[in-house]
Amino acid sequence: MKRIHLIEMLAVMLGLMSSCTDNNDNPSGGENRWGDKTLTFNVDNVSFNMIQVEGGSYQMNTLNDDSGAKLNISGTLSDYYIGQTEVTNQLWASVMGYRPELQFHDADEYPVTQISYYDIMKADGFLAKLNALLKDQLPAGKKFRLPSEAQWTYALQGGKAKSNPPANVGDVAWISTNAGGEVHPVAQKEPNSLGLYDMIGNAVEYIRDNYLDNDDLPTNQGRDFVALNNTLIRVICGGSYFNNETNVFLRDWIMMFDRYNSIGFRLVLADAVEEETIPVPPTADELFYFYLPGFIEQAFNMIKVEGGDYSMVYERDGQQKAVTGTLSDYYISQTEVENGVWYAIMGELPTGQITNKYRYPVTMVSYEDITKPGGFIDKLNELVKDDLPEGMAFQLPTEAQWHYAALGGQKSNGYVYAGSDNLDKVAWNAANTNKANGVAMRWPNELGIYDMTGNLNEICRDRYAPLADLPAEQGTDYAGPATGETFVCSGGAFDSDALQLPVNYRAIEVVAPNHKCNSLGFRLVLTKNK
């Protein structure tokens, strides 16, 4: 009898010791313990694995930017875990309660796409909900996050053991030569040396960091570096099914609210940190996405501008001219036309630019280059003719369309500049830069349109007329005088001062048909054919 009691007591004591040990490693009472090689989590019977990455000092190359350049960086990372696969539709649905629309594939084991950085990171987004649902399974002091670029790149390259790139990229990645132009279920290719699937190819992946050009990244990054600079641009890494075996090793950027069929994400589990406050700029009520072939997935957004009656005041050299008229509904580019879009249409980039990087606005192009038969607009309309709304085509904006959209259209708050009374918030100008910068890195206006103040002067369709000669009553869809040798440009540029940048200011520079320079670019409108 005593022996039975002793055994029972021993069992109780062992149970208490085991309980104490588990609670020290994981006070929440879950089964996952920090330091195990693999942690498995379960959400509503959907399980996923996180693979341990032993931290330490690193010296490694960044991925290529869109010019093919790399940067050698060094720093130190704490231990962390990273998702064995990209987040799947099944896991997204179990957390969020829905599957995103417009995906090529929304079956369980495909990577979730058509989600934005904001959908993942916002206060009631995927990460917040996942951390709440799994709080009892998380090791103490740890939370799910998006990977930093350093964490993602370190894991890609094998972590502390550092592995060589694969001899045959097609063995580990769905790319343009084997993917058939679409995403595939996760974990169908060979894993890397850490056991991670699809780190390159299949779906390019969101990264936590704000995007910095290689030239602006610190080479000595310290401990657990994350680039945060309060812009609306975030890093994406790894290429996707449309990249080839060379350019799949890519670092690129994306706006926080964009959604594509080629972009997904994976998780890291690491030390809980103070949550970043995500800025929420104005966004478009309605827009079209257009996809183009290219070195990276080229897409551009056209934002709907609800037309109506307008009353605007143009100002130039202390003189003012009030004009009234009516505009039909139209769409306008969310950003200035980028190098990548120009290259996708024309097959080459203009010579003489300060930079040829794909996400920068194209310069050194003239009115003629854009509008002549066989020029940019002709080729674009032909390429996307099956995707255009009936009866609509791309053109340069009229001066009235440009200023009406810059003012915010029907949503105008009457700001001095396009989107704010604070110039530096919305514009690259002479006080904060000496060159054109990447698109959409400042705050948008009320319609969700970027860089309508500063960065580049933008070519309009109208022939130029002096302020005094403009009709005060412009009628419907006024497009400028019938004759003239130069054309209007609007918006001011990176070398413009504050006096030249109010939305109602009529630009000093007018352009001859063949004029081109590094402070001149353009954006498009989509309107009814006339």
Image: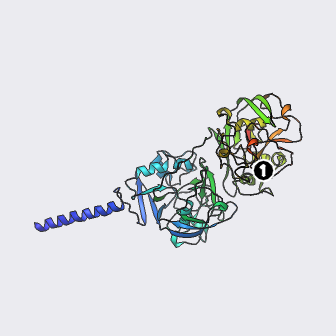
Q: Residues within 10 Å of mark 1 (few under 14, many from 20)?
A: many
Q: Position of residue 419 (x, y in %)?
A: 66, 40
Along the viewing direction, whichever of 255 and 302 lies nearer the viewer: 255
What residue appears at the point 42 percent right and 49 percent down from the top-left corner? Answer: 132
Q: What colour scheme does the image use?
A: rainbow
Identify residue for label 1.
519
The part of the image, by quadrant, that contains residue 33 is: bottom left
Relative to 318, residue 250 above or below: below
What residue appears at the point 78 percent right and 52 percent down from the top-left corner? Answer: 363
What residue appears at the point 57 percent right and 60 percent down from the top-left corner? Answer: 149
The secondary structure type at the circle numbered 1 is: loop
The part of the image, by quadrant, that contains residue 283 is: top right
Along the viewing direction, whichever of 6 and 201 lies nearer the viewer: 6
Q: Position of residue 406 (x, y in %)?
A: 71, 38
Name which residue type carries label 1.
Ser
Q: Position of residue 335 (x, y in %)?
A: 69, 46
In the image, is 315 to the left or to the right of 73?
right
In the image, is 237 to the left or to the right of 51?
right
Q: Quadrant of the C terminus?
A: top right
In the image, is 247 to the left or to the right of 319?
left
Relative to 389, residue 174 above or below: below
Q: Position of residue 436 (x, y in %)?
A: 73, 52
Kindly tell me whether residue 189 is visible in this rendering. no
Along the viewing direction, whichever of 463 and 388 lies nearer the viewer: 463
